[in-house]
């Protein structure tokens, strides 16, 4: 992203605890990090902190979808009905949340307290729900539908950038020999390239409710 904007791309990578990353920004201990604007972005706005937001797609990265629901292929093959019912319920919930974000926020706060004993900040949840409500459905009012071209463009970019390899990113829990940092990637220590033709289909719309 930095190089695409005309910079050198030289920077120091830091990996603080995952759930504390955003706090390093608020404390002035780091310059940039990944956030979800529907949560940390809302937290910052409520705290009166103005963020400079840089979106990957504006800087040469054809970013597809985030966050995503992930399932093992065996689960899809052996429990198709369960997956379809889960996605149907999820779709119904997101469509309802888009139509009535305040009611959805209240339901989430109440459910968290009653079922998990967790006290959520009602105002924060309501503001987050309002933000997400205008972004969780596509132009046709559907939830969860993905486009093949978006994933294809992203995978092509990973291949062309030398990032689709056998190496694991720096937070992966496996053995250190299989892990690389951003500095390793920049130095060319990125593992063995994975051929584009060997990449399987990485998404499906087959289990979503029919429009």
Image (cartoon, rainbow, N blue to C red):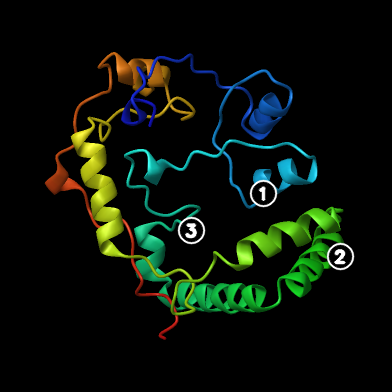
Q: Are marks 1 and 3 in contact (CB under 8 Å)?
A: no
Q: Is residue 113 left or right of residue 92?
A: right
- Residue 49 at what x, y percent from top left? 73, 36
Gap between marks 1 and 3 measured at Cα = 18 Å
Q: Is residue 45 left or right of residue 75?
A: right
Q: In the rendered image, which residue does mark 1 sit on? A: 39
- Secondary structure beneath label 2: helix
The nearer-to-camera label among 1 and 3 is 1
Residue drawn at point x = 64 percent, y = 37 percent: 51
Q: In the rendered image, which residue does mark 2 sit on? A: 114
Residue drawn at point x = 54 percent, y = 66 percent: 136
Quadrant into which the C terminus falls: bottom left
Q: Is residue 60 left or right of residue 156?
A: right
Tell me where residue 102 sits by quadrant: bottom right
Quadrant into which the N terminus falls: top left
- Residue 97 at what x, y percent from top left? 66, 73
Q: In the rendered image, which residue does mark 3 sit on? A: 69
């Amino acid at each position: 992203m930095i190089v695409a904007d005309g910079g050198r791309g030289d920077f120091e990578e830091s990996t603080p605890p995952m759930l504390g990353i955003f706090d390093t920004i608020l404390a002035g201990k780091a310059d940039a990090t990944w956030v979800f604007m529907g949560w940390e972005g809302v937290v910052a706005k409520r705290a009166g902190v103005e963020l400079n937001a840089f979106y990957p797609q504006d800087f040469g990265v054809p970013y597809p979808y985030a966050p995503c629901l992930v399932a093992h292929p065996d689960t899809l093959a052996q429990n198709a009905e369960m997956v379809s019912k889960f996605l149907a319920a999820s779709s119904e919930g997101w469509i309802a949340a888009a139509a009535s974000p305040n009611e959805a926020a209240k339901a989430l706060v109440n459910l968290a307290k009653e079922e998990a004993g967790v006290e959520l900040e009602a105002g924060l949840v309501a503001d987050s729900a309002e933000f997400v409500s205008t972004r969780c459905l596509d132009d046709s009012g559907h939830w969860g539908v993905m486009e093949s071209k978006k994933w294809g463009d992203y995978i092509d970019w990973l291949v062309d950038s030398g990032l689709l390899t056998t190496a694991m990113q720096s937070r992966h829990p496996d053995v250190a020999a299989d892990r690389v940092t951003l500095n390793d990637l920049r130095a060319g220590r990125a593992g063995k390239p994975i051929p584009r033709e060997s990449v399987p289909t990485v998404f499906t719309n087959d289990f979503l409710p029919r429009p």
